[in-house]
Amino acid sequence: MNPLKRFSLVIFSIAVVSITVLAQYNPDSFSAMKWRLIGPHRAGRVTCVAGIPGKPAIYYFGTPGGGVWKTTNGGRVWKPIFDDVHVASIGALALAPSDPNIIYVGTGEETPGRGMYKSADGGRTWTPAGLNFTRYITARGVDPHDPKIVLASARDYFYATPFRGIYKTTDGGQTWRQVFFRDDKTSVVEMVASPDDPKTVFAATYNLVIDPNQRRALGADSQIYKSTDEGSTWQQLSATG
């Protein structure tokens, strides 16, 4: 048989066997894998979670009404680490990839917050980091190489304000620049950077104001925006959603 044909036949046979084996996996092999509650035993939702690559025992999470919590033993014990700030509503949480002891917390989710807070010691102490006028912070992103470069997005449910949009700091929260603003009714609901290119960032927006008297939403516009310079400029990708 021709060597090339023999090689092709071997590759084809391996592919067929692999597909057959995968299609006939035994579900009992995974029966021991079950979800379990790892605490803390409290009511309410979780709005944001952050961990440290290579350290699976350390996790942080934020809540709409219970502050920020931390575990150092894989969830066996959780401790509240944000109580001294006296802000319970947490909208976003991010650790600096280059130094996970540096944590940025954006407040405001269920109720209005008081802007951004920063810790440089793994959550033991906190200092204000600006944006206290935004009321609700929805997402955070920290440059993987420079912990002073941060993006933060803001929304509001009940008021049309000029403070919605996306903000950027290059000095660790001492000063912020509004890098995206469409109009006073457009909020940013989520923001994420590309895993292989942190300068490429996507943001999802919606046009929403809730009538507090009738408790109903006014407006339903939504778009996707993209930045290729780490949030300094933005281009719309989608039509009205």
Image (tube, helix red, strand yellow):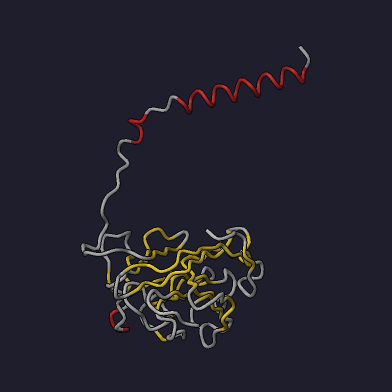
Residue at image x 54%, y 78%? Answer: 167
Q: Position of residue 183 (x, y in %)?
A: 54, 76
Q: Nearer the viewer, residue 45 or 223?
A: 223
Quarter of the view holding residue 25: top left
On the rendered structure, is 214 left or right of 143? left
Residue 181 in the image: above or below residue 26 = below
Residue at image x 56%, y 62%? Answer: 224
State the residue lying farthest toward the top: 1
Q: Nearer the viewer, residue 185 or 61?
A: 185
Q: Which part of the image, by quadrant, shows the N terminus?
A: top right
Quarter of the view holding residue 71: bottom left
Quarter of the view holding residue 133: bottom left
Residue at image x 38%, y 84%? Answer: 114
Q: Position of residue 193 (x, y in %)?
A: 56, 63
Q: Nearer the viewer, residue 203 or 196?
A: 203
On the rendered structure, is 52 left or right of 113? right
Q: Nearer the viewer, residue 104 or 70?
A: 104
Could you tell me how many numbered marks the image carries?
Answer: 0
Q: Position of residue 60 (x, y in %)?
A: 37, 67
Q: Position of residue 225 (x, y in %)?
A: 59, 65
On the rendered structure, is 99 left or right of 12? left
State the residue lying farthest toward the front: 214
Residue at image x 55%, y 60%? Answer: 240
